[in-house]
Image: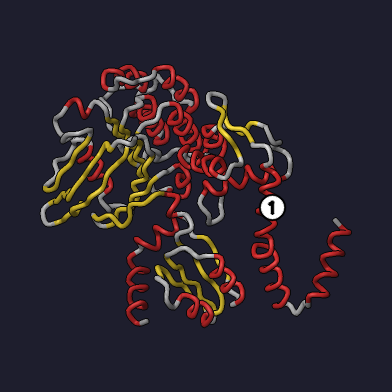
């Protein structure tokens, strides 16, 4: 039933001696919401630029809607890419942007765009360079939503948007996605805010994929164990530890892997507290180099 | 929607709780997948998984073109299942904490009775 809309094999991009994207393999299935997550400079934007035909890969194979994206109008027409800082022609107003949008996006819904303009209280006639940072982001978010492109990318779409505006974005995205399913790739640092919207998460670090898993699987896939140092150490002894902290005789360790009921009882009997690890905390543990170096060391020692 | 278990399980449990406490009567209609998704701000695929779980368990049934409804006998089955898990989920942690504080079983029983009269 599900169709693959993107298929990348060995996808690589180098800038001189720096490898921004290092032979990654992944697929995007039709009509799912993906989170493309990772730290600054991890390679997320580079990947999205290759998928949308803005950059040529140096190696590997890339298939988007059945063919290479670059310079294929039929593929490009089905995609919408909202960049962090979209540039618009000098003297453009939001009204101009929304008027031009249907030339590029065949599914453009002008009524939906109008509703979003009202939701975000966007001044239509003000010149774009006079807009606030948040209003500029709102222009991008509106284009991304109202274009209803079969493959839509939001690359840090909401710089400067306040909490209310971000929740409007999440609500409208979910409502519209339910009515008009499409493939959406959301790249953001506000991981906790979007965690529940995502069906699938791809985590990039230093140009490589750290994991590519269903969001449901990730939930509860790590647990922080806290309590007396000796009890913590004996509990985590034979488990993969991805983070450690300590204060005097107290310690906490974050372990990768699900705990079953017997584990929980054993932890309670040992006087240990168990706390779930959010997606954001998990990613901090996995991509924070200091912590990772630390835990590898300790694992080697153990 | 904040504990460590998958969200679809939490969604299914919320519906089960509503059935157990009677706010969702047997034969009553449950919200659609998209309504769950919008209300809880979760991915519709996640909400669908939660509802599918209820269908697989025979707690709700699909009536084509109309929606999802609580099956007859759902409440009794849910109560039975919850009772089976009551000891490990509630009593076990209670006893562990009680032992830690030096509260014996008889004292604990007394406390339970007193609590019950108060509430």
Q: Residue at x 52, y 70 (%)?
A: A225
**Residue A78 percent coordinates (x, y):** 26, 27
Q: Is residue A186 above or below residue A243?
A: above
Mark 1 is surrounded, within 10 Å at the Cα level, by few (under 14), some (14 to 19) or many (20 or more) other residues, namely few
Q: Is residue A128 left or right of residue A69?
A: right
Query: In what quadrant of the picture does the C terminus of chain B appear?
Result: bottom right
**Residue B9 position in % (x across, y down):** 54, 49
Q: Nearer the viewer, residue A59 or B78?
A: B78
Nearest the eye: B53 or A193:
B53
Picture coordinates of residue A167 (x, y %)? 50, 37
Q: Is residue A246 left or right of residue A76?
A: right
Query: Which of the 4 image quarters holds residue A47?
Result: top left
Relative depth, front residue between A99 and B6: B6
* Residue at horizontal 39 percent and vertical 49 percent from the top: A214
Q: How is the image coloured?
A: secondary structure
Q: Which residue is mark 1?
A: B80
The residue drawn where x is 57% and y is 45% is B57
Is residue A20 at all visible to an observer of this figure?
Answer: no
Q: How many marks?
A: 1
Q: Is residue A25 above or below residue B116?
A: above
Q: Tell me if I can see residue A148 in this picture.
A: yes
x, y percent for residue A170: 47, 36
Q: For the view shown, which residue lies furthest in the right direction? A: B117
Q: Residue at x 42, y 59 (%)?
A: A282
> Tag 1, which secondary structure?
helix
Left or right, A249 with respect to A238, comes to right
Q: Is residue A231 above or below residue A87?
A: below
Q: Chain of mark 1?
A: B
Can you tell which quarter of the image residue A207 is in?
A: bottom left
Residue A238 as seen in the image, left or right of residue B1: left
């Amino acid at each position: 039933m599900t169709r693959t809309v993107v298929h990348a094999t060995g996808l690589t991009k180098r800038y001189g001696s720096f490898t921004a994207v290092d032979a990654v393999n992944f697929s995007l299935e039709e009509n799912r919401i993906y989170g493309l997550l990772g730290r600054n400079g991890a390679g997320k934007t580079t990947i999205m630029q290759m998928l949308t035909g803005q950059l040529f890969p140096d190696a590997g194979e890339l298939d988007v809607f059945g063919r290479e994206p670059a310079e294929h109008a039929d593929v490009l027409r089905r995609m919408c890419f909202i960049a962090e800082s979209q540039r618009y022609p000098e003297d453009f107003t939001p009204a101009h942007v929304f008027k031009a949008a249907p030339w590029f996006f065949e599914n453009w819904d002008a009524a939906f765009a109008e509703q979003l303009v009202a939701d975000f209280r966007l001044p239509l006639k003000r010149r774009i360079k006079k807009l606030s940072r948040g209003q500029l982001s709102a222009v991008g978010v509106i284009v991304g939503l109202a274009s209803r492109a079969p493959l839509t990318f939001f690359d840090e779409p909401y710089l400067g948007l306040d909490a209310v505006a971000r929740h409007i974005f999440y609500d409208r995205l979910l409502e519209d996605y339910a009515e008009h399913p499409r493939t959406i790739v959301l790249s953001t640092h506000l991981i906790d805010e979007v965690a529940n919207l995502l069906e699938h998460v791809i985590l990039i670090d230093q140009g490589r994929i750290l994991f590519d898993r269903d969001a449901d699987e990730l939930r509860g896939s790590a647990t922080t164990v806290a309590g007396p140092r000796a009890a913590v150490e004996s509990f985590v002894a034979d488990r993969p530890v991805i983070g450690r902290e300590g204060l005097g005789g107290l310690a906490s360790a974050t372990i990768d892997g699900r705990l079953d009921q017997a584990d929980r009882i054993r932890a309670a009997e040992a006087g240990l507290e168990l706390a779930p690890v959010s997606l954001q905390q998990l990613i901090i543990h996995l991509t924070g180099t200091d912590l990772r170096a630390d835990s590898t060391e300790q694992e080697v020692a153990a | 929607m904040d504990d460590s278990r998958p969200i679809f399980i939490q969604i299914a449990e919320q519906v089960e709780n509503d059935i157990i406490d009677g706010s969702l009567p047997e034969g009553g209609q449950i919200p659609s997948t998209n309504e769950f998704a919008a209300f809880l701000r979760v991915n519709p695929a996640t909400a669908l998984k939660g509802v599918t779980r209820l269908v697989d368990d025979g707690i709700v049934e699909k009536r084509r073109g109309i929606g999802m409804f609580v099956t007859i006998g759902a409440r009794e089955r849910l109560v039975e299942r919850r009772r089976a898990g009551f000891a490990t989920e509630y009593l076990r942690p209670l006893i562990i904490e009680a032992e830690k504080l030096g509260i014996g079983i008889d004292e604990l029983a007394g406390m339970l009775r007193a609590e019950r009269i108060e509430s």
